[in-house]
Image (cartoon, coloured by chain):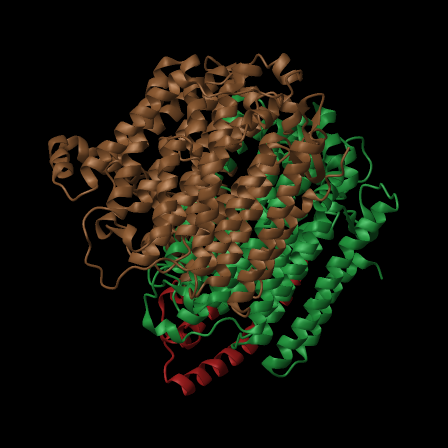
Chain colours: A brown, B green, C red
Amino acid sequence: MENWSYIIWILIIPFLSFLFAALPGTKLKSSVSGLVGIASILSVAILSYITAYSYFFVSGKIDGVFQKIIAFNYVWVRFSEVLQIDIGGLLDPISVMMLVVISTISLMVHIYSWSYMHGETGFARYYAFLSLFTFSMLGLVLATNLFQMYIFWELVGVSSFLLIGFYYEKPSAIAASKKAFIVTRFADFGFLLGILLLAYYTNTFDFITLTDTNGTLITNPVAATFMGASVLTWAMGLIFIGGAGKSAMFPLHIWLPDAMEGPTPVSALIHAATMVVAGVYLVARMFPVYLMVAPDALEIVAYTGGFTALFAAVIACTQHDIKRILAFSTMSQIGYMMLALGVSGYGGEKGLGYMASMFHLFTHAMFKALLFLGAGSVIHAVHSNLIGDMGNLKKYMPITHITFLIACLAIAGIPPFAGFFSKDEILVAAFEHNKLLFSIAFFVAGLTAFYMFRLYFRVFWGKKQAYHHAPHESPFIMILPLILLAVASCLTGFIPFGKFVSSDGRELLVHTHWNIALPAIGFALTGIFTAMAFYKKETNASTDITNALGAVYKWAYKKFYLDEVYLFVTKNIIFNGISKSIAWFDKNIIDASMDGMALVTNYFSDKIKGAQSGSVQQYTWWYMAGSIGIVIFVLYFLMIK
Amino acid sequence: MDILSLLVIIPILTIIGIVFCQTQKQTRIIAAIGMSIQLLQSLYVVWAYLKERALGNTAEMVFTKNYIWFETWNIHYAIGIDGISAAMIALTGVVIFTGIFASWNIKDLSKEFFISLILLSMGVFGFFISLDLFTMFLFYEIAVIPMYLLIGIWGSGKKEYSAMKLTLMLMGGSALLLVGLLGIYFHSAPGGGPLTFNILEISKIDIPVNVQLFLFPFTFIGFGVLGALFPFHTWSPDGHASAPTAVSMLHAGVLMKLGGYGCLRIATFLLPDAATELSTIFIFMTGTSVIYGALGAIMQTDLKYINAYSSVSHCGLVLFAVLMLNKTAFNGAILQMLSHGLMTALFFALIGMIYGRTHTRDVYKMGGLMKILPFLSVCYVIAGLASLGLPGLSGFVAEMTIFVGAFQNESLYHRIFTILAISSIVVTAVYILRVVGLLLLGPVKNKEYLSLKDAEWHEKLTGVVLIIAIAIIGMAPLWLSDMIMDSLEPIMQKLTSIK
Amino acid sequence: MIQGVPLQHILLLTTLLFFIGVYGFITRKNLFTMLMSVELMLNAVAINFVVFNAYLFPENLQGHFFTIFIVSIAAAEAAVAIAIIVNVYRNIRTVNAERINEMKH
């Protein structure tokens, strides 16, 4: 048994780095905070690799099953005799895999930002927030219990909020950060209710206890029902709402495209590779519970994922902002992962979907971060986000071009790039389980190839642009992460992923299913060639098609008007409808009734004030009248009777 | 000298010291020294309490002292603390300490101002250490009355109206409260013998249920008015808006906690049957407070109004938790009182500092302050994040404890109100982020503000002390919640004994 | 005890006298006439004391004593009152009760 207590440093180092960069405010030299940030994330990455090595190859396995290891665990707060929140570190295949993903991407982004953010006023603040994010994200994946996950879930939310709103003088950035925070907060409301409901019936937050396939929750689930569905289905469904919010699933996706207001490396780290897959990670973490006691909730996961994959892909075909296209593509790919989880079973071959989902998460992180960093490089050169302002960049930026192409091929699912392998597993899993979802996934694969290559050709080929000053290749510090990630995108597909990650911890041998892979490749190639035909040279074909589609195109371009619906609900119903009327009610009913009491008192005191005139004569008059009255009363009523 | 009475004596000595001061400088230095000693003393009390418990003292209250004060009616000066009061004492110590520094530059009648302020804090300290209902009520009134002067003289805006409104509503509350307390007193000896005001003695007897049902509304509403219970909360927005900075801090930070503390320690502890039977009605009122306050805050434009409504919401959560009648929720209520006390004090301090510079509290007139006043703005953001329940800051621990506790009640009625209360986390995020966006972020709206100076040393001290306190509770809540949990045991025993 | 005059007649006289005093006190604005009205009331009461004493308890003298007290105190009171009134007149040039309201506001 190995001593895993060093895992705690994976959390402590980024937190210290955050404090170091944040506490002195502006007094610290910006380069110092940047260097400290990079050094700390480098050490975290090394620790993560050591952990991964020793977990996967040395001591993680007992009797051919990967164990769930509690590296450390401290009580954080006690709610009652049975319920408590622990802060700890749980090692199992997916958390170790996530450690590697997060620290790698974070390291790349830290390095890349050194050059990308050079000269920004908030350089130190930027690195502080990045460290905070890395800390929270690592805490999230290491969580030993649902509540710890919720804690770090909120923390990644806030670091995402801070980073999206990094350019805090820009109104659009403020609006986007607010939107991101509030939409995910709304989802977290569901998550929290789910946690509370689950904890009420199981008396624990602990993942190992909850997901134990021989544990009481799974072998002897609670029978209580509410409105026709089991309470556990409710709980798991509510927890999935949290995951859907963070992972930008329909209909809680509206914050993700706007979140692109943040600096591009941030989008690569948070809104492409790590934070947005937290929802997938959550479902994967609770997977046995979903599958065995709340299959209805899992069904919802699958369909939400499938629908989002399609929905986002359609929108991505119509957008003009390079980062938004990538954002929609992220949504679509996360939809894939959700779908894969949704169609998975448990154990052996049945657990293929689970493995595929995690595999896709892994490869997607690499090539999507690469795409974003490449886009950042392009934006850095062109000073615009709109693909209309770009074109023919392959001449100016050869390395960016090649790495971007590799990433596009990877996401389109062309062998031998990474995306092919993971996507193939997803398609196989969907095919075996649900033909409808399979056909959606299959169709989206082609669509993905189309819109990615639309982007690629528009940016790197296409018409010759008259640039103000010629774009030039980015500096080496920005190129280095691109090259490393490109290498990763080429090679990670060959990792025998099933050996390490599977639904039950046992080895799962996977092989490419060519009967599904070949048509998928063909379809993807069709997409690529269509895009090539439209966009490689400047042609009118694309505008013709746009015009032919007319209203449908406009719908998709406007993202199906969901933003407007949300805006209507929040602004007109909640703000102006409810909140204003409450303000009115408070002022004119409640407060007025309090003031009314004072007014009534005042009125009567005003009326009887005249009696106290200070005039002795008046007093005498009342005195006499009173005495006579009393005399008459006494005589008439008491004496005479 | 026993360490608890010192908490009352130090403020009195400080007041006497201030009386002999000549200038504003002397006054504030004396006040600062006095309240620093007071802060150390209150922290020492907590430490001494923890040590006492660690040594194995399991008495319900420790450091008890009992002097007869008025023999005819058996009124005592009885003092003692448990974990709950120790925590509240520490909170008061921190808030009054920072309050002094937040009013560092007060010019008019500074002597009288500091005297009233310290007198108020003395009342609060006395309230928290009292074990005798009568002395408790006495200190309660000492804490409430100076508020009238503080708002009426040093306030801003329509201060006479606000001061009058606040004082009258709180007096109305204490009139109800007095009925309740006297009612408890007259039923404190069912088997004959001398009547008593002592809480510990009353808790050992059972007041007849029909009497409890009559007294509980008086006691609960009486304290509830101070805790901004819907619909008796309207003194809070006007009162806070007109009050000077330190008074808002003390009032929202500490005085409103007297309400929650009283509801728990007197209404629920001494009248448990009635609390169980009548909780449904009051859950409706408090649950409404929570969501109503939060929604009400969304569209306000005055910074202090926003915060006042937010206080209604957060303090509503305290009373809501008290009515959930289980240990976790009680614990959450206390934590929420501490957390809300600290962060709302921070909020009001910052609003005061910003107002002192921009001379407006209208959020639409300001903007982009982050660039001009970075220190104050960062503090404001931290306060905001604490308020919307960010993990690592105090609000999260408190709210989660309340929610987990509230969820222990299985009935649909409780569930509905619990879910409503939980939904306030979303609404809170909305109004906090709205203010942060309008006030701090974005381009600078008014060019005159560009010349404003960031925080001075005493303002920094205020902010830093409060933030440290918030972060300590937020990051390491275990010792605190365990301390409170232990002290909740008598209340729980009393509650379970009647079920 | 006056022969041929019943008690009721005298009481009627003192009642009239008293209410004339009351009426004067209530309606007059001049401080002097108000003082005179008070004297009327006092005298009505004094007569009542004497008459009751003489008619109902002729062997006792308390009524007479009381009357003498009243007369002497009335004299002192008149002296003080007139002194105040004269001072008031000196200060604000009026003896009208309604216009003496300096202290009221």
Instruction: Give the residue at the far bottom of this rendering.
Output: C90
Say whether residue B449 is left or right of residue B386. left
How many badges with numbers are in the image?
A: 0
- Going 69% across and 30% down the picture, which residue do you hit? A60
Say whether residue B69 is left or right of residue B305. right
Locate residue A222, reporting x and y percent: 59, 15
Say whether residue B314 is left or right of residue A168. right
Q: Where B426 sits versus C22, above or below? A: above
Q: Where A29 sits versus A534, above or below? A: below
Residue A593 occupies quadrant = top left
Residue B372 occupies quadrant = bottom left
Locate residue B72, reporting x and y percent: 79, 49
Q: Where A134 sits versus A528, above or below? A: below
- Report the front residue among B196 and A608: B196
- Report the front residue among A196 and A579: A196
Locate residue B190, reporting x and y percent: 77, 31
Quarter of the image with the N terminus of chain A is top right
- Report the front residue among A34 and A219: A34
- Going 27% across and 47% down the picture, which residue do you hit? A459
Say whether residue A110 is left or right of residue B406. left
**Residue B234 makes an appearance in the image:** no
**Residue A373 makes an appearance in the image:** yes
Locate residue B399, reporting x and y percent: 57, 40
- Going 59% across and 49% down the picture, which residue do you hit? B393
